[in-house]
Structures are given as C-alpha cells and as structure tokens.
Image (spheres, grey):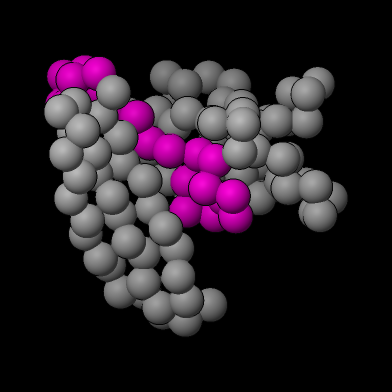
Amino acid sequence: MSVKVDVTKCNGCQQLKEPRCVQYCPGDLMALGSDNKAYIREAHDCWDCMVCVKLCPRQAIETRLPYQLANYKATLRPKVYKTKIVWTLTNTKGETEEFVVKTKEF
C-alpha cells in the first residue's frame, strides 16, 4: 500500500512549525514540497503504518490499496475522533463500508 496526498486539502499544517505527517512518519518519508504541500518521498518504502493518514487534521492523506488487493481507485480513509477511528473503505464500484475502532482518549 501507499499513501496519497490530496493537495487541494493539504495546507502543510500552517499552524505548526512542522506538519504532523512529516514530524511523526517513522520512516522519515513525508516531506513538504516547494508549494508547502505534503508528499511522500519514496512510496515503495512506506511501512503502511498509516500514522500520517490518522494524524492529518485536514484529512488530506489517504491510503491507496494496491491493485492486487482491491483494483484501482479503491481507498481507505480514517476519521479520527477522541475515542474512536472510523475507517471508510470505498471499493472500485464506489460502494462504501465503515469500520469503527475504539481508541483511548487523546
């Protein structure tokens, strides 16, 4: 898998000195481009931990499922709340399914 940044949503975490995705990526793969938008340096090196996806306050980063698992255009997006993460899986037909994972309060 890999992550994809929606540059129309990403604002580079303007309110922070360093964007969350850049700050917390354990593989040091996320970076800011000259346009102040996040991007992944080497998608093939991504560990699929989804830290960047979960921490993005603008929900500008999503997980792209590989062709072998779900065909093109399938996505997996989280919405992070205080006590849960709601994962929305959209398949290639545009059908969606939600999964709720309870978490500890931040």
- 40 or 15, nearer to the observer: 15
Most distant residue in the bottom direction: 105
Residue 46, image x, y percentages: 44, 30
Residue 10 shown left or right of residue 97 in the figure: right
Residue 2 shown left or right of residue 101 in the figure: right
Is residue 101 one of those drawn in magenta? no
- 98 or 22, nearer to the observer: 98
Q: Which residue is drawn at 29% across and 23% down?
A: 73
Q: Residue at x 47, y 28 (%)?
A: 4
Q: Which residue is drawn at 50% across and 39% down?
A: 61
Is residue 67 one of those drawn in magenta? yes
Residue 40, image x, y percentages: 57, 26
Residue 18 shown left or right of residue 61 in the figure: right
Report the label total. 0
Q: Residue at x 45, y 70 (%)?
A: 81
Q: Is 2 located above or below residue 71 in the figure?
A: below
> In the image, which residues are magenta?
53-72
Q: Is 27 located above or below residue 58 in the figure?
A: above
The quarter holding residue 31 reads top right
Residue 25 showing in the rendered view: no
The quarter holding residue 25 reads top right
- 24 or 86, nearer to the observer: 86
Q: In which quarter of the image is the N terminus?
A: top left
Residue 83 showing in the rendered view: yes
Residue 69, image x, y percentages: 15, 26
Residue 106 shown left or right of residue 103 in the figure: right
Most distant residue in the front direction: 94
Residue 87, image x, y percentages: 30, 54
